[in-house]
Amino acid sequence: MGEAAVDLSPRGVVADLRNELDRLVAGLDQEPAIKAFKDGSAEKDLYVAFLVQTRHYVALTAPCLEAAGRRLKELGEHPELADLFFQKADEEAGHDILVDDDLRTLGLDPEATLAAHPPGEWITAYNSWITAATNGRHPAAFLGSAYILEGLAVERAGKVAKALVASSNIPKIADAVTFLDLHAEADIGHVDDLERILANLEDPTERDAIVMTAAATRGAYLGMLDEVARTRATAH
């Protein structure tokens, strides 16, 4: 019998991305930091460490969207997608400020806190990857990261925020989950939109770049959570 044919259809790409998202959600539920957020055992320093690392990658979202749009224009490819990237960059601008607001609510100075806690190894790796991808031969690769992060927000951000508010003893926590709450609501329709866009991309190499970036994002996010938990544990 011959080897099974590899599904290179757009639907196959969506299935691959969904698989990456499912693997991320399953892995996330096993992470000590997320378990602590859910069961009320998380202390302030753990949540702050999570917010800080989140802030370090979210700050790159709008610039990378703009870079991907410019690169597509340079290549003369997917003009509609390029325009969408520019639109999304405008929508995403300022989302990092939501994290700053959450840090202030917790009684911290965002600038000083971020300066004292630079990006960890996994977020440094992710930021390097996504910057290279959006400026490379296949800037549409950003769609892989967008699918993973927006899908994760829909699947878990709201649940984690509610659990933190319901069970955590962190002072003022009810007013310090604005980033999680916003993305739980704002990203609901974004995953469906991304799947429609992906259905129009036919270049197998481009689709490979998208799936590869999704996998890199999954690995980096889980690595970040593990790093956050270990760093916090070491500090005690």
Image (cartoon, rainbow, N blue to C red):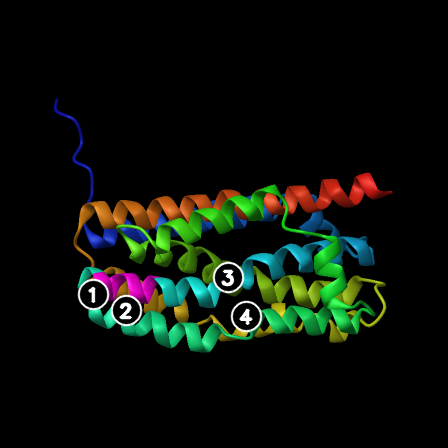
Q: Are marks 1 and 3 in contact (CB under 8 Å)?
A: no
Give the mark nearer the N terminus: 2 vs 3.
3
Residue at which label 2 appears: 82
Q: Specify whether 21 is left or right of 72.
A: right
In the rendered view of the protein, which quadrant contains the C terminus? top right
Residue at mark 1 to residue at mark 4: CA–CA distance = 27 Å
Give the mark nearer the N terminus: 4 vs 2.
2
Residue 97 sits in quarter? bottom right
Q: Specify whether 160 is left or right of 168.
A: left
Instruction: Give yes or no for residue 128 being in the magenta stretch.
Output: no
Q: Are marks 2 and 1 in contact (CB under 8 Å)?
A: yes
Residue at which label 1 appears: 78
- For badge 2, the amino acid type reads Ala
Which residues, given as a range, are shown in magenta?
68-74
- For badge 3, the amino acid type reads Leu
Residue at mark 4 to residue at mark 2: CA–CA distance = 23 Å
Residue at which label 4 appears: 183
Locate residue 64, reporting x and y percent.
Answer: 42, 62
Query: Which circle marks residue 60 in the picture?
Result: 3
- For badge 1, the amino acid type reads His
Q: Residues within 10 Å of mark 4 (few under 14, many from 20)?
A: many
Residue drawn at 82 percent across, 55 percent down: 43
Give the mark nearer the N terminus: 1 vs 4.
1
Residue 170 sits in quarter? bottom right
Mark 2 residue element: helix
Residue drawn at 24 percent across, 54 percent down: 11
**Magenta region, main secondary structure:** helix
Query: Which circle marks residue 172 in the picture?
Result: none
Closest to the camera, between mark 1 and mark 3, is 3
